[in-house]
Image (spheres, grey):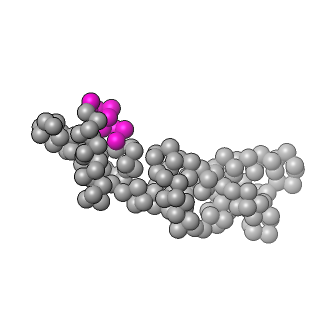
Amino acid sequence: MSENLYSDIYNKALDLISRREHSVKEVQDKLSRKFDSDEIIESVIEKLTLNNLINDSRFAEMYTRSRKRKGFGPKRIAYELSIKGVKEYIASEAIDEEGGWIESALNVFKKKYKNGPAADFKESMKQKTFMQNRGFTFKEIESVMRSDML
């Protein structure tokens, strides 16, 4: 193993994670695009994980909080975390710990639809589809569509 290449890869990894949290898969993918040495990359990832510099649980918590603030629901966030290589049980834990999803759905709905739930069936379906696309569950959408919540 070339000592010089190892330190180049390690320094690049540190550079990446110094900007924001990353999942293990994200760091691995970014390093693989820049360097052509899978076993050294694997060794660097191992060291970073061992030193808790990259941690999928911490990443999932940060990512969930950030996406929730931008108005996305738990289903969408879970999907995005899976694409980023975070294991399902880690994503579920982060999403459950974050909580407050009905309140979040309500805020997203009120921001988009100032006049509240539509009485017209077609318009109401559009509103529900919007909320679904944002990643909210049926339960959260239904709780928002009941006008007594607004």
User: Is 41 on the left or on the right of 58, as rendered?
Assistant: left
- What residue is rendered at 50% in x and 62% in y? 94
Can the viewer see residue 2? Answer: yes
Image quadrant in which you'd find residue 49: bottom left
Q: Where 30 falls versus 86 (above or below)?
A: above
Q: Quadrant of the N terminus?
A: top left
- What residue is rendered at 25% in x and 45% in y? 43
Q: Which residues are magenta?
A: 28-36
Residue 25 percent across, percent down from the top left: 39, 44
Residue 84 percent across, percent down from the top left: 46, 45
Image quadrant in which you'd find residue 99: bottom right
Residue 15 percent across, percent down from the top left: 25, 46
- What residue is rendered at 23% in x and 39% in y? 40
Q: Residue furthest top?
A: 36
Q: Main secondary structure of the magenta part?
A: helix
Image quadrant in which you'd find residue 106: bottom right
Residue 131 percent across, percent down from the top left: 69, 51
Q: Residue furthest left?
A: 3
User: Is 99 on the left or on the right of 55, as rendered?
Assistant: right
Can the viewer see residue 110? Answer: no
| Pick the front one: 10 or 113 | 10
Q: Quadrant of the C terminus?
A: bottom right
Q: Assess whether residue 59 is covered by the magenta stretch.
A: no
User: Is 101 on the left or on the right of 26, as rendered?
Assistant: right
- What residue is rendered at 64% in x and 66% in y? 103
| Pick the front one: 47 or 15 | 47
